Amino acid sequence: MSSLYKKRINKVRALLKSTGVPSAIILSSAKSATKSGDTTYSYRPDSNLYYLTGSTGKEINLFISTEHRNCFLIVPPEDLHKSAWEGSPPNYRSLAKSIGAELIVTDNASAELRKRLVNHEVLYHQNSNGTLSFHISTELQSIPYFARSKLPASFTHVDHLMQELRAYKDPVELKLIRKAANITNHALFETVPFITPNALECEIASTIDYLFRIQSAEPSFSTIVAAGPSAATLHYEEQNRKVKSNELILLDCGAAYQFYAADITRTLPVSGNFNQQQKELYSGVLEAQEAAIKTARHGVSIKKVHSVAAKLITECLVDVGVLRGKVSQLMNKGAYKPYFMHGIGHSLGLDVHDLGNLRDRGEGTLKAGMVLTIEPGIYFCKKTRHIPTCGIRIEDDILIKRGAPEVLSAGFPKSISEVEDLMNQ
């Protein structure tokens, strides 16, 4: 694995050099997040720093530059009092060797970094409060331009640089994402028997999370279990309703394995069978997802993938009597948007909403090696004609190729017959 991190760091240096100006990047460990009082959430390393080092160390600073042959790993001396409470820090000497870095042990990392920033024009930095990278960039930007004395004058968010690498997954990353997806599917299969009338949404969500953890994983985001009208809220949090037999239940979850995320959504009939209305709506969403997946390949815009799904969602809404008119005219007016109000998907990797943002403007172009979700849905935020408040979404994780894409999350059924067979076992 050490050669992998060296290779990634060399790619960062090459990107810096390609700008044509003396440039540097500072990445600092994420700070612990306070839960309440003096307790914290489980530590989660900064994704960019982890991508380049594979380390979960809490006090690391990585400096990469066009002007220095080696990168620098800057860490504090061990604090024996802190070690007694939190455990000994990683073996930083071994880490530095594995990534090809020069190790600097100091209790003044800020001074060491500023010294190495002399004669650089551009600094790529983090925007996370509490990180040394953010502190240094903020401090430098507060200095008048004429007084900076060969220190950087231009500042850019590090994600702008890192997305050029992290948007494309290497074989190691793909293996981890597949593993995360397999864990997620296994948890979904094992959760099905607990989806019964009068079960609480939170009980089902807790079952999924438990099944992640006993497979050496954890939730990559807060698990969503939304039954009936709850599913009309995209990021539903309360999860305090009892499940009813005539409802659909939406499960949106994903395991994180070695920090790599999966993200899968399925919508299931609590009773075991879809009623006719549910079949029509579910079939529309499934057809939209399958068409979008077939469209998603190298060189295709994410806007086109979304449009393919939106057209089929519109046709479904016409078929069930929610929309009236010609599909082409309804598409031009965006008549589907109150019922399908989100993008077709998002990048996936070390973060569940990974770098290589394809969501905001819908202008991105898919390229081989990218991993993204495809997740169309139909939502009725209030009773509409004869349709009760509800939501249906189907989501899978896709690897973009030059030919047909690969569904990394394949495994848990989607077709109506397969879903009903599973629910009635």
Image (spheres, helix red, strand yellow):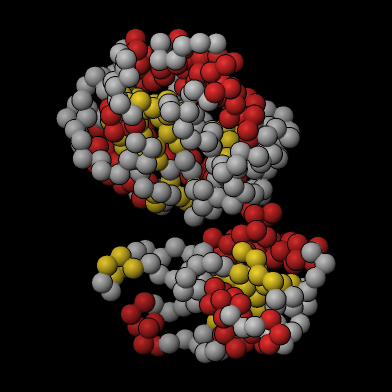
Vertical order, 18 against 267 (above or below): below
Residue at x 29%, y 22% (from the top left corner): 383
Q: Residue at x 49, y 55 (%)?
A: 258
Query: Which one is in front, 187 or 238?
Result: 238
Residue drawn 68% across and 55% down?
A: 165
The image position of residue 109, as x and y in percent, is 56, 85
Total marks placed: 0
Which of the two residues, 261 or 325, is positioned nearer the viewer here?
325
Q: Is residue 239 left or right of residue 412?
A: left
Q: Identify the residue at horizontal 54%, vertical 67% (top origin).
A: 127
Q: The C terminus lies in which quarter of the figure?
A: top left
Decide: is 273 above or below 338.
Answer: above
Residue 287 position within the rendered picture, expressed as x and y whole percent measured from the top left = 52, 18
Farthest residue, direction right: 20
Res. 136 in view: no
Instruction: Report the side of 380 relative to 370 (left or right).
Output: left
Q: Which residue is at the front of the view, 356 or 29?
A: 356
- Residue 1 vs 185, above or below: the answer is below
Q: Please provide percent x and percent y for residue 43.
A: 41, 65
Residue 81, percent from left and from top: 36, 87
The quadrant in which residue 54 appears is bottom right
